[in-house]
Image: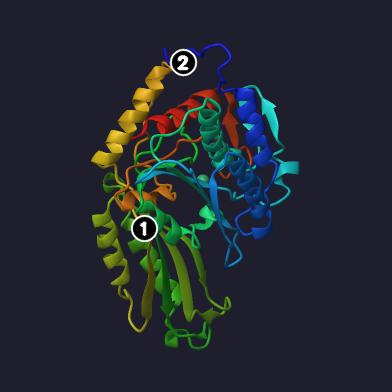
Amino acid sequence: MAVEAKKNEPKIDAEEVLEGIVEWVSIESPSHDAKSVNVVVDKVEGQFRDLGLKLDRTPGRDGFGDILECRTPWGEGKGILVLAHLDTVHPIGMIERDLRVRREGDSIFGPGIYDMKAGGYIAYYALRHLIRQGKKTKLPVTFLFIPEEEVGSPTSRARIEAIAKDHKYCLVMEPGRDGDKVVTSRKGVGRFVMTVKGRASHAGVRHEDGRSAILEMAKQIVRLEAKTDYARGITINVGLVRGGTGVNVVSAECTAEIDLRVPSQQLAEEMTHWFLGLEPIGSDVEVTVSGGMNRPPYQKDAGITDLFGKAQAIYREIGKELNDVPLTGGGSDGNFTAALGLPTLDGLGADGKGAHAAYEQIYYSSLVPRTYLCTRLLETLE
Ligand SMILES: [Zn+2]
């Protein structure tokens, strides 16, 4: 059996995996704090250098940290792209408050431990484990560490897409899902801003002269939210509204920020067209809409189904069944690679719960199976 390790052969050691994860987690790295993100980039860079990988570190811009690329010196042709992000949503200091690094039963807590430092470290450990067994991957492997995924990867999207074109598979080390599942599809994400211009007037003396931008926005919001269609997988959320200048003034301006999620490219186009064509409902007001899709839908195609099948076969080697979650509304960098037709398997990180929350945690019991899965995917993909 594949799992029965021979004597003296290095084993995947849960304690060792956890120790490495905790080292990364102990360096807090909020997306907007380039300096802090780069401290963890330094750490990861050193570890991959020690494995003999070829490194390419691109200085960050727009206030974000550096992008780190690590390539195996062996292998030819199109290989495996492993994606992980080193930023977290948690502000500095969380590690001394709610997210003190600690273990309670099967759960280990820490800022960004689940989303997704555990996943990133598991990928590193997997390659190191192959190397120390004297093995190599059949395909070249590129690890790409992203500094600002949590804010939509504005400075790394182009890089991810350029690199994706030179690869055969993409493994995304984002968190595993409840019940040890992986991700094979994600909705696309759109962001729109609606601005309404009305006409200000005195609410008491010249009420009739005013054209309330807030009233128009209220009508627009009802129309927008009504477009949510769970059966078709479309959701619209008006998440932020700002308007008015005073309680006794008919409002001249109101803006709303809107989040759109769609399961397919066709719906992405259809909904974008609908948004940008929205017109006023009331009279004497102006409505403008800007925005578009910022992550394309990640649809489970034949290539993804095939890659998922390979992962399932590997999990069976250790007596486990691997399932995928139904279409999720959360986006990741996997949206970019899948939209380019690159077979992408996501959610390969540790199982746990509480992404972005003050109770974020991973499950210790998932460390060995997840590391085994990643190790064997790297080893066997061809
Ligand atoms: Zn993440």
Label 2 CB sits under 8 Å from any ligand 1 atom: no
Element class at badge 1: helix
Q: Nearer the viewer, residue 241 or 17?
A: 17
Q: Nearer the viewer, residue 277 or 143?
A: 143
Which quadrant of the view contains residue 352? top right
Give the residue at the far right of this rendering: 96
- Apparent side of residue 103 relative to residue 173 in the rendered image (left or right): right
Which quadrant of the view contains residue 291? bottom left
Residue at image position (43%, 34%) is: 137
How many numbered discs?
A: 2
Amino acid carrying mark 1 in the image: Glu
Label 1 CB sits under 8 Å from any ligand 1 atom: no
- The disc at residue 11 is none
Depth check, mark 1 against mark 2: the one in front is 2
Q: Position of residue 332 (x, y in %)?
A: 44, 49
Residue 33 visible in the picture: no
- How many C-alpha atoms fall within 10 Å of the one at disc 2: few (<14), some, or many (≥20)? few
Residue 56 visible in the picture: yes
Q: Which residue is mark 2?
A: 3
Residue at image position (38%, 52%) is: 164
Query: Gap between marks 1 and 2, in whole Å?
Result: 51 Å
Residue at image position (60%, 34%) is: 361
Q: Position of residue 311 (x, y in %)?
A: 37, 29
Q: Which residue is mark 1?
A: 225
- How many C-alpha atoms fall within 10 Å of the one at disc 1: few (<14), some, or many (≥20)? some
Element class at badge 2: loop
The quarter of the image holding the N terminus is top left
The quarter of the image holding the C terminus is top left
Amino acid carrying mark 2 in the image: Val
- Apparent side of residue 89 relative to residue 299 in the rendered image (left or right): right
Residue at image position (23%, 56%) is: 266
